[in-house]
Amino acid sequence: MAWPGLLIVARLFGVQLIVAGIFRFVAALAADELTGGTRALLSLLGIILLIPGLYAVHHVLISLLALALLLCIFWIIDGTGELFVGLSRQEMRGRAWTGLMGVLSVLARLIVLISPAISPCTLAVVLGS
């Protein structure tokens, strides 16, 4: 039930990259106060965003897998942050629960990262229910 929705999300991911790339490229050309190096970097960033965006729009399943992996990596970093907050803040109430949730979050995301094929299936189940 959620599979068409996930395909739309994957295409929107590509469109968002394309739009961001175009905006960065136009910003590099339109801003008068920028130096030459900043313009070159913004132009390069625009191209770097535009190319994967075009690829993501045309190869939806690969972009869906890449999106799931990027989310997984972000969630691992977020879980690690929760773990460190739980360990470092002595005065915080419920810090053991925060640390435990950080550990569980990192472990769950590592499992998904090791087996990325279950990520789109898990997203389909969560979005479909």
Image (cartoon, rainbow, N blue to C red):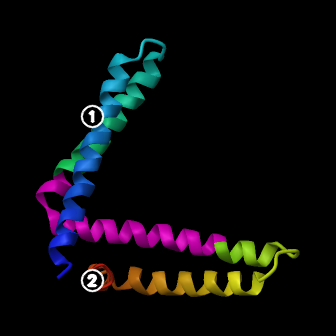
Q: What residue is drawn where x is 57% and y is 69%?
A: 78
Q: In the rendered structure, which amino acid carries the disc numbered 2?
A: Ala
Provide residue 59's location: percent of width, then percent of height.
13, 61
Q: In the rendered structure, which amino acid carries the disc numbered 1?
A: Ile
Bounds of the magenta segment: 55-81
Residue 29 placement: quadrant:
top left
Circle 2 packing at 10 Å, graded few (<14), some (14-19), many (20+), is: few
- Helix, strand or loop: magenta stretch: helix
68 inside magenta stretch = yes
SS label for mark 1: helix
Residue 4 placement: quadrant:
bottom left
Image marks 1 and 2: residues in contact by CB distance under 8 Å = no
Circle 1 packing at 10 Å, graded few (<14), some (14-19), many (20+), is: some
Mark number for residue 22? 1
Given the current orientation, which residue lies at the most extreme left position? Answer: 58
The residue tagged 2 is: 117
Instruction: Judge whether 11 appears above or below 7 on screen.
Output: above
